[in-house]
Image (spheres, helix red, strand yellow):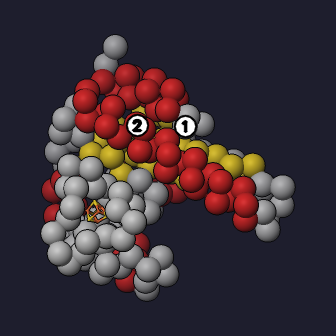
Amino acid sequence: MTAQDKVIELAKEAGFDNAAKLDPKTIVLHEQVREMCAEGKCNAYGKNWTCPPACGDLDYCRSVIARYSEGVIIQTIGHLEDSMDYETMMDTAHRHKANFMKLAPQVKAICPEAICLGAGGCTVCEKCNYPEPCRFPEKAFSSMEGYGMLVSEVCTENGVPYYYGENTIAFVGCCLLV
Ligand code: SF4
């Protein structure tokens, strides 16, 4: 079994609703995504080591991604009662984070050079220690958006659905493997 297949298996065991192959060569990083981060709507821009600008400029992020030859897209899908069902949205977000925290160390155990990118910046600490040194650099994780990825585009380019129909929400992350 390849590392990629093993990560897909582990992702499903961890609770992700979908896990599928990702080709890092399909990943395009966009300045526009960074501009959205800079608007500060998620309150992490300039406040977290794993978010812009601290996670590095797009050329740096491109150089990181270029190290990887394969990857896995991971998704947690929520089924809402209606478009105002914030409780299920939050539950799905928490489920995605819990799945991610379970999977990431397992991926590192198989492939120590791997990186896992979540949905949203690192939340290992209740409050990031930025600009003081990161407390847990070995556990810290960035997000796909923080790296400048358009998540829907990465899914589409790899033949993975991003939209699961009316009143659904999908949280997406990925693992990149050497
Ligand atoms: S591990 Fe803690 S200090 Fe380091 S990036 Fe994550 S939240 Fe910030």
Q: Relative to 149, is 107 above or below?
A: above
Residue drawn at x 41%, y 53% is: 118
Q: Nearer the viewer, residue 130 or 114?
A: 130
Q: Quadrant of the N terminus?
A: top left
Residue at the spot of label 2:
103
Q: CA distance from mark 2 to mark 1?
A: 9 Å
Lower position in the chain sequence, tag 2 or tag 1 = 1
The amino acid pointed to by label 1 is Phe
Residue at the spot of label 1:
16
Q: Is residue 82 left or right of residue 120?
A: right
Task: Say whether residue 88 is visible.
Answer: yes
The amino acid pointed to by label 2 is Leu
- Marks 2 and 1 in Cβ contact (< 8 Å): yes
Does the Cβ of the disc 2 residue fall within 8 Å of ligand 1? no
Q: Quadrant of the C terminus?
A: top left
Residue 66: x %, y % from top left: 19, 49
